[in-house]
Every structure is written in structure tokens, then in C-alpha cells.
Amino acid sequence: MKTENISINNKNYTLHLQYQDNEKLRKEFNRLTQKVWDFDFENYYQSGFWDNSCILYSLFEDDTIVSHTTVSLFEGDIDGKPGKFIQLGTVMTDEAYQNQGLSRFLMERILADFKGKANGIFLFANETVLDFYPKFGLVAVQESEAFQTVENLKLSNAIQKRKLDLDQENDLKLFENLVENAVSNTVFPTKNKSTTFFYCYANPEMGYKDSIYFIEDLKCAVVIEMQDKALHILDIFSAEKVDLMNIIAAFQDIPFDEIVLGFSPQQGNFQYRPWKDDDLQLFVTPELQSVFEKQPLIVPVLSHT
């Protein structure tokens, strides 16, 4: 935890960083998150999977949080070279403190703190702030979703799978080991164990705790979601490279007309179409702009913060 006294437009605030272990401050952070975004991070904290890759940047006036941005750190690569990505999320300012330069201060501070420490920064912005992030050099880019219809798939015989029960210690440890040691199956990897467990364990009511399957023959865990007649494969955690056709074959017992991927696959056999997460627009720093412009890509769905 780090604390600084800050003056912005002649008003005094306290900047708290990485303070999730402070119950009083965390409770206040959760209060504003619930007010603005209709969820909070308490289950995440209590799960034990909130690590130092999820960093809180919050401005307080006395004991009240007034503005916030979360920094999430990911392992990834650009053109096959290992590196790090930063995502900014959970951006919020209390209504009574808006238009006072607080979000600008946090943005400038984060960019300064991480200058030269990452291969790129990205974030998702709603339509009310589309003119805000270009002021900091970020540009809007198009995401593309990989999909394929059933008739264009050549699938092998069905492979056995079983649903994981993460309330059972053995299954939790199995999944944790696969996540920690997973090789990349996407051309835009954003590896972060903490974020994965936010979605797959800490928040059953809004995540995918009940949607994780283990395919023993392939030594992999698969997170899925059914929407209408589309089978969404949100992510794969495997000890070695896997053939997506074999993974899809394991789900032939579920009727579907289309396969949709929550990541950009390394192998072919897929079509692409423009994609947006509801009304959110992806913004990236210039280092990532060319990456998204030269090939169809999507930020892995389970990496969004």
C-alpha cells in the first residue's frame, strides 16, 4: 500500500495505491464500485486470488473515495516476443466530483508510473468518454470475432470431458495448475491468473465457475458459454498446444449451429466478423495499433476489466 497527499485544482486529496488489504478503504472502494457498476470486488478479495497484478489507484477526500482507475498487468507478446500489457478498467468518478480533473490526474499518473514498463496499454470505453482517451495518445481500433458454422467444421469422434467443480479442492488445484502453466493458444495472449480466477471462481453469479470442463485426453480446461444456438469457447488452458477441432469435438453432445471464440486462434479454419462488447470501444496505445490493424484480433474475453 502506498499513500500520497495530492492537490488538484487547489483541492486536497489522498491518493491510495494497492490498498486492497485495508478493510476500511476496500469497503469504501466496493461502495462506489457497486454504485457505479452494480458489482463489487469483495468476493474477489476473499477468494485469495487477488494478487499484485491488480493495482488500485484511488483518490479519496478524507474517508470518501471520489475517483478511481484499476491497473491490470498481463503477460503477453507482440509478434512472438515476450512482453507485458497493461489494461485500465473500473474507471469511475463520483457524480459530485465529475468534471474536476480527477480522472485526468489518474490517467496521467498511471501513464507516468508505467512509462517504459509495458509493450502496450489498452482499455474499453463507453460512448460517453470516446473523446477523452485520444487526449492521452490512445486510438480506437476494431476488434474481430472468430467463428465458424457447424457445416464447415470437420470434427473427429467425440472426446470425453467432465465439468469441473471448483468447490472441490482437487478440481480447484487441477484448474489452478492448468492456468498457471498454460501455453498460449491465441495470437494476442493476455495471461493473468488473478483475472482468470475473478471470472472463473470468485464471482459465480457473474462469471463462469459453472462452465469449466476438463478434457483429460487433451490435458486442458475449457471455459464455455451457450448463447442461443452458438457455443462460445471463451478460453482454453492447456499444458501444450491443442487442436481446436478436437476441443470442439468434445462438445458435440450439446446442440449448436455455430462456434464462437472468445480469443483469436493461432490456427485457421475460422471466419471473422466485426465485434464490440456491448457499447464499449477498445482503445490502445500506438504500440498496439498496428497489431490490431494488420490482422483480425480480439482482446480475450476473460481478460476484460
Image (cartoon, helix red, strand yellow):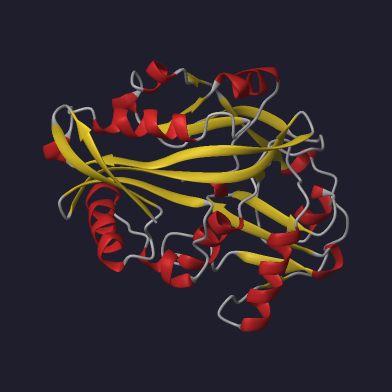
In the picture provided, is 167 more to the left or to the right than 261?
Answer: left
Instruction: Identify the image quadrant of the N terminus.
Output: bottom left
Q: x and y percent of residue 229 in the render? A: 58, 49
* Residue 119 position by quadrant: top right
Examine the rendered structure and indicate whether residue 35 appears above or below residue 44: above
Q: Residue at x 36, y 22 (%)?
A: 130
Q: Position of residue 218 (x, y in %)?
A: 84, 62
Residue 304 appears in the picture as rendered: no
The residue lying furthest to the front in this view is 5
Q: Would you place residue 108 above or below residue 35 in this image?
A: above
Residue 35 in view (yes/no): yes
As displayed, is residue 46 above or below residue 116? below
Q: Is residue 141 left or right of residue 253?
A: left
Rendered residue at 48%/60% (across/down): 207
Q: Relative to residue 115, is residue 63 drawn left or right?
A: left
Residue nearer the viewer, 67 or 272: 67
Residue found 75% across the figure and 34% down from its top: 270
Instruction: Pick whichever, 268 or 295, lies toward us.
Output: 295
Q: Quadrant of residue 29?
A: bottom left
Q: Where, by quadrant of the figure, is residue 76 drawn?
A: top right
Position of residue 225 in the picture relative to residue 255 (left or right): left
Q: How many marks?
A: 0
